[in-house]
Amino acid sequence: MKKWNEKSWGIFINLIIALAIVICGTISAKAQTTTCADITYNGINPNTCEFNGGSSGSPCVTIDGLVPNQSYIGTFLTFQWQNNPVQTLKITGVVPMTGTPNMNLQSTTCTPTAITELELNTNNDGKMYDLLGREVNEIEIGTMYIQNRKLYIKK
């Protein structure tokens, strides 16, 4: 059996110290429990679920009584400040933190209730395009082209 020399004891003591630092660091990290989160969000039109303009943030909040984390990004919530109308918001960022939550927000889903019809803007101007959508002025015989939304072959 090999005897422990001064170098062996030094390595052993350094390992014990490193282990103690790791254990103490873990204990102190667990003592700082995340209690709320700073969130950033965009205003959403609740009828279309699309960006309505406006971005902001709210410090130290909970959502449905829970501390939001990164999985909340992209989800929706409702918010009402004092006598202002209820707003639908889409979360764009979450930073967990410790502190006293100053507001509990309510999560929601966003289901479009209005669909805007798209109008087809047809412009029958006689321009010719190849099959890749590039405008062309002259077409060779046997070549396919598009003109006024119809497909032709030059004869």
Image (spheres, helix red, strand yellow):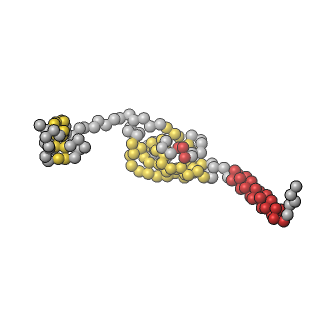
Query: Farthest residue toward the left?
Result: 155
Q: Is residue 64 visible?
A: yes
**Residue 7: which quarter of the image?**
bottom right
Most foreground residue, 153 or 120: 153
Query: Farthest residue toward the bottom?
Result: 6
**Residue at the location (19% across, 47% down)?**
135
Residue 58 rendering spot, x and y as whole percentages:
52, 51
**Residue at the location (46% across, 44% down)?**
90
**Residue 125: which quarter of the image?**
top left
Q: Quadrant of the C terminus?
A: top left
Residue 150 rendering spot, x and y as whole percentages:
18, 35
**Residue at the location (13% across, 38% down)?**
154
Residue 83 rendering spot, x and y as whole percentages:
47, 45
Residue 89 relative to residue 114: left or right: right
**Residue 127: which quarter of the image?**
top left
Query: Farthest residue toward the front?
Result: 1
Q: Is residue 102 visible?
A: no
Residue 116 relative to residue 60: left or right: left
Q: Quadrant of the N terminus?
A: bottom right
Residue 94 relative to residue 118: left or right: right
**Where is 18 relative to 83, above or below?**
below
Most foreground residue, 87 or 30: 30
**Residue at the location (34% across, 35% down)?**
115
Q: How many marks?
A: 0
Residue 141 relative to residue 32: left or right: left
Residue 114 rendering spot, x and y as whole percentages:
35, 35
